[in-house]
Image (cartoon, helix red, strand yellow):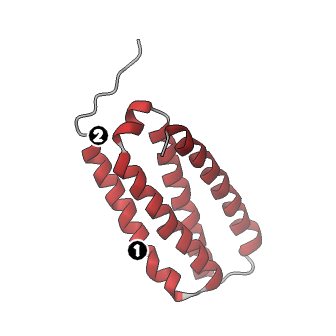
């Protein structure tokens, strides 16, 4: 994925997370069971956190080129964790809940892999 594409996708995902947060707070609060609403809010929260991480990764060409696998794992996490949390919260279809741990594992692995991907990284500092 190109840096510009990742940056644009980060902005789009952050807009979606704000919109979904508003939907959860204003439309779903009265219509979902508390457990489902909490699941929905967790999906939105992690969507925001990891979209911000991708935004940070994409803001530096040096960093962007180093964090190849970390970015990929975050996208897997966004789909499997956030996406399935949101779908499960709205539908209560159990299969979606069963897929959520795959995304959670991808997020954890993305952070750990990122640690090793930038182990020897030394950012250039403008003077």
Residue 15 in the figure: left or right of residue 43: right
Q: Quadrant of residue 8?
A: top right
Using a 10 Å C-alpha cutoff, classify the residue at mark 2 as few (fewer than 14 neighbours), some (14 to 19) or many (20 or more): some
Q: Earlier in the sequence, mark 2 or mark 1?
A: 1
Q: In this view, does 40 lie above or below 52?
A: below
Residue 65 in the figure: left or right of residue 75: left
- Between 29 and 67, the one lying in front of the other is 67
Residue 64 in the figure: left or right of residue 91: left
How many marks on residues? 2
Q: Position of residue 69 (x, y in %)?
A: 35, 51
Q: Which element carries disc 1, helix, strand or loop? A: helix
Q: Where is residue 12 in the image (x, y as percent from the top left)?
A: 64, 50
Q: Where is residue 66 in the image (x, y as percent from the top left)?
A: 34, 39
Look at the image and tell me in which quarter the C terminus lies.
top left
Q: Is residue 20 above or below residue 94?
A: above
Instruction: Identify which residue is drawn at 52% across, 43% down.
Output: 55
Residue identifier under label 1: 101
Q: In this view, does 106 lie above or below 40?
A: above
Q: Position of residue 13 (x, y in %)?
A: 60, 53
Q: In which quarter of the image is residue 91?
A: bottom right
Instruction: Identify which residue is drawn at 53% across, 51% down.
Output: 51
Q: Which mark is residue 118?
A: 2
Using a 10 Å C-alpha cutoff, classify the residue at mark 1 as few (fewer than 14 neighbours), some (14 to 19) or many (20 or more): some
- Between 61 and 89, the one lying in front of the other is 61
Q: Which element carries disc 2, helix, strand or loop? A: loop
């Amino acid at each position: 994925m190109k840096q510009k594409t990742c940056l644009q996708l980060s902005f789009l995902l952050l807009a979606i997370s704000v919109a979904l947060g508003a939907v959860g707070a204003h439309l779903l609060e009265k219509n979902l069971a508390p457990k489902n609403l909490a699941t929905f809010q967790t999906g939105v929260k992690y969507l925001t956190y990891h979209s911000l991480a991708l935004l940070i990764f994409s803001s530096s060409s040096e960093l962007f080129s180093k964090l190849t696998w970390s970015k990929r794992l975050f996208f897997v996490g966004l789909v499997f964790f956030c996406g399935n949390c949101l779908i499960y919260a709205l539908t209560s279809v159990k299969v979606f809940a069963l897929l959520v741990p795959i995304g959670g594992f991808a997020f954890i692995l993305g952070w750990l892999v990122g640690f090793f991907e930038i182990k020897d990284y030394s950012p250039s500092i403008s003077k």
